[in-house]
Amino acid sequence: MRRPVLVCALALAAGLGALVLVQLFGGPRDLPAIRGLPSPGAFTTWGLPIMRLVHDLCAVGTVGSLLAAVLLGEKDILARAVPRWALAWAGSAAATVLLTLSDFVGAPVLEALRSGMLSTFILYVPQGLSFLIVYVLALAITLLSFVARSRPWVLLVVAVLAVLPPAYAGHSASAVDHDFAVSSLLVHLAGVVLWVGGLFGLLAFMREAPVRAVERFSALALWCYVTVALSGLLNAWVRLGRVELLWSSEYGILVLLKLAAMVALGWFGVRHRTRTIAALTTTKVPFLRLAAGELVLMAATMGLAVALSRTPPPPGESPAHGVLGFYLPILAPGRLVTEWRPDPILLLAVALACAAYFRWSDRRRPVMWATGLALFAYATVGGLGTYARAMVSVQLVQWAIVGALVPALLAMAWRPWRPPAWLGLVTATVPSLALFTTPLFELSQSVLAVRLIVLLGLAVAAYTTICSGIWPVMAGAQALVALYLLFGPAQGRGWYSQLDDITWLPAGDQWLGALVYAAIAAVAVATARLSPKKEDGHAPSRDQTLDAADPRAGGDPRDLVGHRGR
């Protein structure tokens, strides 16, 4: 137990050291009180960033312990380490709420509590609500770690999701391009906790870590490193906008320091891949020493990140629509093809779907799978995705492509399982009912998280329906949706009324969108009808093919030639 405690102490010291240095030499400090102006006091000014660092480190410890439980298959980790880290995470989230309230109202903590604003702050102010969600999820992980030992990956998913809410309350939430800034930060945070937490988990439970688990984490770490680096650069670019601000602003200098730390961490990764992992079969000492130093540097980088989150970026100069959060050019037919607004989360989903196909499918129809993913990318981050929030017709076309045509193409390429009919019935009807008969339509336009859930949820739901084989239900549901859009009430009236300054919105826009929606849905249903059934869409796995071709197993080697010739 000495090694984890020592490494945690060194990591905490490194993170605090980096944070305090930035606070001393340029970060926000407690200025002398001015008569008539509120001041939270030195305790809040210094305590809030320190508590944020403790909060982040506890999140890393929780995710790392869960990831170690998944990689190592050790259920005891859930009972030993996860409850402690998750409880500390919940406590630090609660303390962060109190300190943030003090900073928000400009009064010391006790005075802020006596003001009676706590309930309003945690329910209606993003800074309070985000950490309230973290607190609830961390407590849930603490309790579930005792009863869900057979499903550590479920708790791991919950823990990663619990890291994300504060992204909505930071500087990215007020960036010129709000959606892009928040999406890139969400990807950045998820990559960081998996990367840093995974390394901590290996160090803390190295006795149970076989070489195989370390090699598996090495592959994950490489992907996390690339994801963290790219998403961090994209987020910094949105906040700065000009290269010269990197060295002419305090925010830019901190970005450069983080970039230097990322380069150094890349060197650690290269050393692991070329030296220490290969030597694990004989000794663990080189790996442990290098990993400990890497983890300390990671903690120092997290301290820089906390300081960066407390540093105001330079004011943006890009024009943006007040409601949409980005500049939207006047619609022209060509712009539906040429315009694009990349979203890191949606592009990551496309990349993961592509990787899943080539990792687990029979790879018999890669062109069809690639076509479906390319169409999904165009509908979400291309011209349709750019204008969807401004025009109901484009929005309906986007949902028809994402929620009908794309899943049909993907199902033609690969059906990994056959869901029960009742599940297909639910996924064919519930999403459309929720989207067009509840406030979910308008929420999906104004709230980024809801919009992402709707896009991904529509695709997954329709894919599940088609894989279940009940395409007639899908046909009926889509026909009813089209009729409802043609003859039912106007959709998103409250949202689109805020876009009155966009004078090029045509009359009868919903009618046009409903007609195109019906046409696309009809094509999707026809495609789903022609899709191969599950048993026809699966070739034998590679291992099954080799076994069938092995004479010792009673197979015929000529079967291998036939398989390769397909």
Image (tube, grey):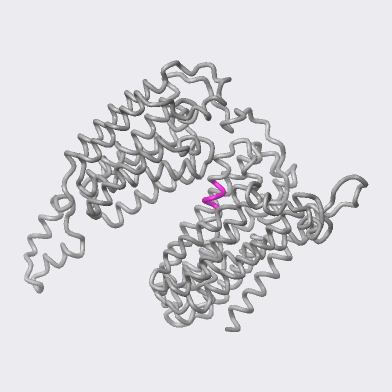
Furthest-right residue in this view = 35
Along the viewing direction, whichever of 163 and 39 lies nearer the viewer: 39
Q: Is residue 201 on the magenta stretch?
A: no
User: In the image, what residue occupies the spot 45% across and 16% down?
Assistant: 506
Residue 352 coordinates in the image, percent (x, y): 39, 51
Stretch in magenta: 184-188
Q: Is residue 409 above or below residue 515?
A: below
Classify residue 111 by image quadrant.
bottom right
Residue 505 coordinates in the image, percent (x, y): 48, 18
Residue 365 relative to residue 372: left or right = left
Residue 60 relative to residue 463: left or right = right
By secondary structure, the bulk of the magenta-drawn segment is best described as: helix
Q: How many marks?
A: 0
User: In the image, what residue occupies the spot 49% across and 57% down?
Assistant: 224
Q: Is residue 45 above or below residue 427?
A: below
User: In the image, what residue occupies the spot 11% across and 65% down?
Assistant: 549
Residue 38 coordinates in the image, percent (x, y): 85, 48
